[in-house]
Image (cartoon, rainbow, N blue to C red):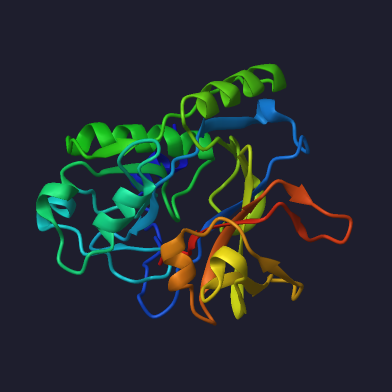
Amino acid sequence: MSHLLRALLLGVALVLPTFSSAEPPAILLANIYRDQVDVSRYLVSEKLDGVRALWDGESLRFRSGKTINAPDWFVAGLPKQPLDGELWIARGQFERVSGTVRREIPDDAAWRDVRYMIFELPGAPGSFSERAEQIRRLVRQAKVPWLREVEQFHGVDRSTLKKRFDEVVRGGGEGLMLHLADAPYETGRSDVLLKMKPWQDAEAVVIGHRPGKGRFAGMLGALKVRMADGREFLLGTGFSDAQRRDPPTVGVTVTYRYRDLTVNGLPRFASFLRVREE
């Protein structure tokens, strides 16, 4: 019997989180998988290239706390329980889903292709394994075609983990997520949640622009960015010509990808990916 079911049977009031637009909600953030854990203790799922979305039982919000203007029919059938997941269309469709969910006036037809893929229940009791089972029950009970659970795989060892990772990447997926099976719900960055990708990604704040030369004369050459720990570096690849003509402004947070870190802790082969989503 799950902790949630016990609580309901005993009449215990559960205190579930609410998400305010005033500030970003506290959520669980992944560390990078580097063979530092016993993978058999984790549940494994595909890392989806969607837009993270938090449902508080009444409204759908970005991780920034800003409201997502979803159609009324999209949210009408969602359960009252808080949910954490990704708004997703398919592998390789990030730009499409991002453009759809960021519109002030929702495009009803475009939203028909969006799925809300749930991987966590904010504030719910019990282990992650128990919460994953509860997610499956909630999705079945809701009977809403666009509400789906993220499939979790059990009993993984390093060999099967690598095989599954290779299959996902070859198929155009981003990688894998590992979530500690017996972990209670928590927030912040932790080894409770790990991401496994062929490229790593991180965020930095734009603090300046370097002019381009040669073919890029009159356009952006590189962004000068500052990492969370205060270190600075130049980000000069990964931009389209349109982005070089109209680059991210100073103060904006950007996401970049990189292969690994230098001995000085700076990203190696860093490449611009996108301006951080709300």
Q: Nearer the viewer, residue 99 or 272?
A: 272
User: Can residue 67 be seen from the camera position used here?
Assistant: yes
Q: Is residue 62 left or right of residue 207?
A: left
**Residue 33 in picture, x, y percent from top left:** 69, 40
74 in relation to 135, above or below: below
**Residue 42 in picture, x, y percent from top left:** 62, 32
Q: Is residue 215 left or right of residue 98?
A: right
134 in relation to 87, above or below: above
Quadrant of the rendered structure where residue 278 is? bottom left
Q: Is residue 240 left or right of residue 78?
A: right
User: Can residue 2 be seen from the camera position used here?
Assistant: no
Q: Is residue 171 left or right of residue 176?
A: left
Q: Nearer the viewer, residue 278 or 121?
A: 278
Residue drawn at the location 24% of the way across and 44% of the way down: 114
Please state, as top left, top right, bottom left or bottom right, where the N terminus lies in the image: top left
95 in relation to 227, above or below: above
Q: Nearer the viewer, residue 91 or 273?
A: 273
Name the outermost residue toward the front: 214
Q: Nearer the viewer, residue 249 or 23?
A: 249
**Residue 20 in picture, x, y percent from top left:** 36, 74
**Residue 97 in picture, x, y percent from top left:** 30, 50
248 in relation to 14, above or below: below
Q: How many marks?
A: 0
Quadrant of the rendered structure where residue 142 is? top left
Residue drawn at the location 29% of the way across and 57% of the way down: 99
Residue drawn at the location 71% of the way across and 22% of the way down: 158
Residue drawn at the location 35% of the way across and 76% of the way down: 21
